[in-house]
Image: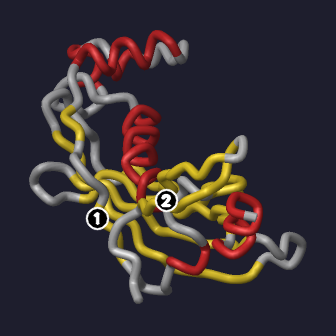
Amino acid sequence: MKKLESKEIIEIERDGKKVKKIVRGRFFEDFELGERYYHHWGRTFTEADNIIFTTLTMNYNPVYFNDEWAKKMGYEKSIINHLLVFNTVLGMSVEDLSEQALALLGYTDVKFLKPVYPGDTIFAFSEVIEKRESRSRPEAGIVTFRTVGVNQNGEVVIEYKRSVLVKKKEHFLKREVG
């Protein structure tokens, strides 16, 4: 049976009492090659988002806050910081892909394909492109995803791959339920 939601409720014992616990996220067994997840919501970027992120990360490239400079560099106006776009798209995917992760193993093939401007809304989806047992951690497996972010016009603005070490459900339940 395919798991459609990324949460379920289990009963566990705590301090001699039975309590209900919400288990969020998918386990290794829940992922299938080729499966695609359309992440919720989407996010409209504002100039304020961009200025705050750029300032907090000390990334003072003028294309992120100076319209005239950005135009000289070939953009319509100031663009949204690439790393803010990356982190936001990643954040959109967590509920569907990595709430049961033990470790993030890395990102590869990160491509920023189109600029994002204040006022643009970004949506994301991910596809399972690889899945295998962990050779060193029998309680987990490795899942690799290709994630794509698109703007309100359906144009791809970012894509990347990431690999995650994900818990196996049987080991999790033995630990939680006993």
Q: Could you tell me which secondary element the residue under label 1 belongs to? A: strand
Q: Could you tell me which secondary element the residue under label 2 belongs to? A: loop
Residue labelled with disc 1: 38
**Quadrant position of the C terminus in the picture:** bottom right
Query: What residue occupies the far right of the structure in this picture?
Result: 136
Position above or below: 88 against 78: below
Residue placed most toward the observer, 37 or 111: 37
Which label number is shown at residue 24?
none
Residue 102 position, x and y percent, is 71, 55
Residue placed most toward the observer, 2 or 102: 2
Residue placed most toward the observer, 155 or 138: 138
Task: Please give the name of the residue rendered at 16% of the width and 37% of the height, measured from the top-left corner.
Answer: 120
Q: Please state if 101 lies on the left or on the right of 140 as rendered.
A: left
Q: Please state if 6 lies on the left or on the right of 141 as rendered.
A: left
Task: Please give the name of the residue rendered at 41% of the width and 36% of the height, measured from the top-left corner.
Answer: 82
Task: Please give the name of the residue rendered at 42% of the width and 60% of the height, measured from the top-left corner.
Answer: 7
Residue labelled with disc 2: 25
Give neighbour class at mark 1: few <14, some 14-19, many 20+ (Cα, 10 Å).
Answer: some
Residue placed most toward the observer, 178 or 97: 178
Q: Please state if 39 lies on the left or on the right of 90 as rendered.
A: left
- Amino acid type at circle 1 is Tyr
Position above or below: 16 against 66: below
Task: Please give the name of the residue rendered at 62% of the width and 81% of the height, measured from the top-left corner.
Answer: 131
**Quadrant position of the N terminus in the picture:** bottom left
Q: Nearer the viewer, mark 1 or mark 2?
A: 2
Q: For marks 1 and 2, give the CA distance.
A: 14 Å
Give neighbour class at mark 2: few <14, some 14-19, many 20+ (Cα, 10 Å).
Answer: some
Position above or below: 168 against 115: below
Position above or below: 26 against 50: below
How is the protein colored in the picture? Answer: secondary structure
- Amino acid type at circle 2 is Gly
